[in-house]
Image: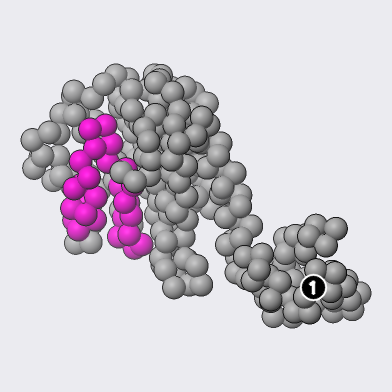
Amino acid sequence: MTFSIVGRSADGQSLGIAVASKFLAVGAAVPAAEAGVGALATQALANLAYRPQGLALLRTGTAAADVVAGLTAADPGRAERQLGVVGPAGPGATYTGAECFAWAGGVAGDGYAIQGNILAGQAVVTEMERAWLAAPALPLARRLHAALAAGDAAGGDRRGRQSAALFVVRRGAGYGGLSDVEVDLRVDDDPDPVTRIGALLSLWELYFGKPDPATLLPLEGPLADEVREHLAALGHTDLAAWAGVENLEERLVDGAIDPLVLSHLRTAAG
C-alpha cells in the first residue's frame, strides 16, 4: 500500500524519509528518524513498534542490516511487514516479508533503502533508485522528493493516491536552531499528494531555508532606499518587523538582504 525511500545526505549529517500511499495520513505511521542516529520506514502491515525499537538499536551503533534482522526476527508478523533502515554511515537495508501483497520489494545501497508494496510494478522502485543516484548534490529533502516523484510517475501505489510525507532531521537544523527536525511536511488526504508535498517543500525553502551568503545584497545606497520605501508602503519602518509578520525571519542577515526576501517584499508592496 506504500512506497518509500529512507536516505542519508552526502555529508552524512542529514537523515530522512519520503513516503506516499493510498492510505490516510501515511506520515503518522511510516517514518521515524533521529539526528546522528538513523532513519527508518515501517510499512505494509506496519509495525509501529519498529520505530522506537529501531532507533534504540541504531543508537548503539548497530548497522542497518543488523537492525532489520533484529527487528524482523523478533516479530511473529514479519511475513507481512516491510522495513527500510539507514544509519549515520554505511549501506542501508530493506526487508519485504514473503506475504506482502504484490508487487512488493525493495533495493538498498550506500546511504539509502527503497521499498514498496501493492505497487504498479518493479519499475516504481527502479525509477526511485535511478532518481536518487542521479542527484547526489541536492539537499536531502529535495533528493528524497525527487525519488518519490519518480516512483509516483512510474505508477506508485496501484490502488491510487491519497497521502505523502517528508521528514528530515539534522542536528540544530530546526526552527531557530533549537530543534533537530529540519523538515516535517505531510499531506494527509489529497488526490495528488506527491506533487502537493513538492509545493510545500518549495514554501518551506522560502520560509525556513538559510540564505546563501554568495547571493546576499548589501543593504545600502539605492537598495536600502528602495527597501525603506516598500516597508513604508506596507506600514512598517523596520525590516525585521515586516519579516516576522511574513514568517521570513529565518532569512534575515544583518546589513544585507536575501534576494528571496527582497523579491517577496517587492511583490507585497506591489
Q: Where is residue 256 shown, x and y percent of the image?
A: 75, 75
* In the rendered image, the vertical position of residue 255 relative to residue 107, given as above or below: below
Quarter of the image that includes the C terminus: bottom right
Span highlighted in magenta in the image: 30-57
Determine whether, in the image, residue 41 is placed left or right of residue 212.
left
- Residue 178: give x, y in percent of width and height: 44, 73
Q: Residue at x 47, y 22 (%)?
A: 155
For label 1, the SS is loop
Q: In the image shown, does 54 or 251 lie closer to the viewer?
A: 251
Q: Which residue is mark 1?
A: 235
Please indicate, yes or no, whether residue 259 appears anywhere in the rendered image: no
> Is residue 228 placed above or below 89 in the rendered structure?
below
- Horizontal side of residue 95 vs 39, given as left or right: left
Vertical relation: 150 (above or below) 249 = above
- Within 10 angstroms of label 1, few (less than 14), some, or many (20 or more) residues? few
Residue at point 83%, 62% (across, down): 269
Locate residue 129: give its quadrant.
Answer: top left
Q: Nearer the viewer, residue 165 or 127?
A: 165
Residue 252 in view: yes
Residue 232: x %, y % from top left: 84, 74
Q: Is residue 32 magenta?
A: yes
Query: Which quadrant of the figure contains the N terminus?
Result: top left
Residue at position x 39%, y 21% from top? 159
Front residue of this view, candidates 113 and 80: 80
Q: Amino acid at mark 1?
A: Gly
- Residue at point 55%, 39% (across, down): 196
